[in-house]
Amino acid sequence: MSSQANLLTLGSLPKPVREGIEAFVAAAQSSLGDSLSSIVLFGSAAEGRLRPTSDVNLILVLRTFLPDRLAAVQPALSFAKAAIRLEAMILLLEELPAAADCFAQKFADIERRRMVLHGDDPFALIVVPDEAKRQRTRQVLLNLTLRLRSRYALSATQGEQLQATVVSAIGPLRTCAASVLDIERAAVATPKEAFARLLELLGNPDWNYLPEFLSALREGRAADNREISLVLVHIHDLTRAMRARLEARPTPL
């Protein structure tokens, strides 16, 4: 899809976000000139599922690092960060293969959810190694397990704090589910759908309510202390089950 066609598809986003992205893209093109290879939108904004609290995630891919040109982007980047929560990763074209290996889970998500706003698609020929994806997903899941356990110990009787902890875990949990299914060669469209599908595969009926319930929490539903405590415990157990599944299954050839 062409850059112009992709810009037109931004119409699914709220008008302030769409206009903020378009303004930043124009400013980056003007400031960076021919040192700019590509601009790629990824994550929830790229799939048209941006929430009010979501960041707008962009990658600027540069042919070369020219400090003066990059410094000229600062006013537009600062404004977009304040106005639409824009976060920009800045990579050199030559760094993409190494970044895909080092940040395997993030780049696997970019493979699934991206929109090219300028230039060619820099990810068209990038393959995230399965083993790198596996190792990074294991790390994220273990970190999530430990964080949930610690937060529960600190806030077991404080429902609002527990709810904030659970909501912050939803994004990483869904992305990990998508990575697990990627490694197993199971086709999934989005992390949200991957999460629901993985729960089906894991087959624990106690967790069947989680996809719908977690979506409601993300939309602002309030849960009482007893309810959210149980959810946190179930997510804690789920992260362990996901890690066990990941470690038990060999990487497909």
Image (tube, grey):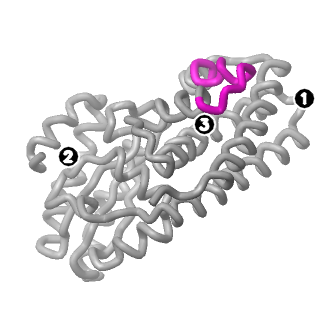
Q: Which residue is found at the position 79% from the left and 51% from the top?
A: 146
Give how far apart the Cα atoms at labels 2 and 3 are. 29 Å
User: Which image quadrant is residue 236 in?
Assistant: top right
Residue 227 lies in quadrant: top right
Please tell me whether mark 3 sits on a helix, a strand or a loop.
helix
Between tags 2 and 3, which lies in front?
3
Mark 2 surroundings: few (<14), some (14-19) or many (≥20) residues within 10 A: some
Q: Nearer the viewer, residue 30 or 102?
A: 102
Q: Are marks 1 and 2 in contact (CB under 8 Å)?
A: no
In the image, residue 32 lies at what x, y percent? 19, 70
Apparent side of residue 13 relative to residue 35 in the rendered image (left or right): right
Which segment did they paint magenta?
A: 201-213
Residue type, mark 2 in image = Glu
Q: Is residue 85 left or right of residue 206?
A: left
Reply above or below: 9 against 99: above
- What secondary structure is found at the residue carrying circle 1? loop
